[in-house]
Image (cartoon, rainbow, N blue to C red):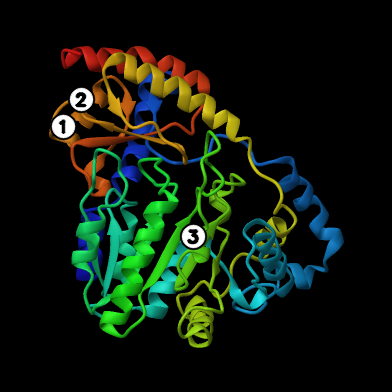
Amino acid sequence: MISKKMESLVKNSSAIRAMFEEGKKMAAVYGKENVYDFSLGNPSVEPPKEVAEALKSIPDSYGANYTHGYMSNAGYEEVRSAIAKSINSRFGTAFTESNIIMTVGAAGGMNVIMKTLLNAGDEVITFAPFFGEYRNYVSNFDGKLIEISPDTSSFQPKLDEFEARITALTRIVIINSPNNPTGVVYSRDTLEKIAAILEKKQKEFGAPIYILSDEPYRELAFDGVEVPYIPTIYRNTIVGYSFSKSLSLPGDRIGYLVIPSEIDDYADIFAAAGVATRILGFVNAPSVAQLVVSKCLDASVDIGIYNRNRELLYSKLSEYGYECIKPEGAFYLFVKAFEPDDKAFVAKAKEHRLLIVPGSTFGCAGYVRIAYCVDYAMIERSLPAFKALAEEYGK
């Protein structure tokens, strides 16, 4: 018999993963080329050549015991130092290896920080729409997720509602920009206003409130849009970063936390996060992946490929009558469904062999997410299906 908590989680398992698995079944029936799977944010762009070169160089650069052995729970010191220097060169910060903890992706890092900071009943605020797994991460540590309702006119955060819902139990505010699922980048003005609100609330309640900046899409920004670095705006910011998208390494599960020395209770938090990394069962981030990314900090995937996909899909869907804010980053379109029931719309799309994800998964019913990190030719093949779906609703 499984636990009561897991019973609920199994019953309500990820709609994204469920659609991905459904796509594999449909491909076996209709042929892969006749199923248009936009469900999973799985990068289609190959890792940059620097990744392969780094992998080849590692056996000659390090002894086997070093490469495959244990290290500090926080990760290899030289890897953390290289990452700190890279961040400093880009954002004018002054981090060292003592501000970096290597993690099992951004997801692992977020769980480490929540284990570190949350007591049962503590509140974590996030802005809808949001990555649905946040619900589970917070639940893992008996916290309470507070969802700020979406402003569907812009998908920038609703600041009045945000301020009103901060309480003495608020411990963490999650910010994800560029955003999954909308592709929206939170403006510097928005972030500065969030920081001002939090500064006021910290004084009011006499306790720190930490921003946890979830940044797997930082490098995936288009048209020269600025993605502000939040630690330079709000002192009590912790960053969770992943190389899953910037280097197309989602299966390697490698990322890091930035825990600035300036945050309240830095020494205790850094030490506790290292212990949390161990006792959550990660022990340390994957050793080979750490060494690989340390050699690829100036490399990136070709985001021009994603931009080409974005331009084609956005222009064609707009032509067919779909409503969507043009994304500034990440690799998703968040599209208004042609009926209020987004799950029914998704089911209707599946009849056209289009696999998309309901917006209710992200805390925003009436919308659907389309992941365009796919082959350009598949987008081209899918366009008649998108058009037929729109026509079915009289568009």
C-alpha gap between disc 3 and disc 1: 32 Å
Could you say where residue 105 lies in the image, as x and y percent from the top left?
Answer: 52, 59
- Left or right of 298 on screen, residue 340: left
Q: Which residue is mark 2?
A: 348
Q: SS of the residue at dot 3?
A: helix
> Vertically, is 352 above or below 342?
above
- At label 3, the amino acid type is Ala
Q: Mark 3 packing: few (<14 Cα in 10 Å), some, or many (20+)? A: many
Could you say where residue 154 lies in the image, as x and y percent from the top left?
Answer: 30, 40
Q: Residue at x 52, y 36 (%)?
A: 222
Q: Residue at x 58, y 59 (%)?
A: 254
Is residue 181 shown to the viewer in this render?
yes
Disc nearer the start of the sequence (3/1): 3
- At label 2, the amino acid type is Lys
Residue located farthest toward the right when viewing the structure as drawn:
60
Q: Which residue is mark 3?
A: 106
> Vertically, is 249 above or below 193?
above
- Left or right of 13 on screen, residue 394: left
Q: Which residue is mark 1?
A: 344
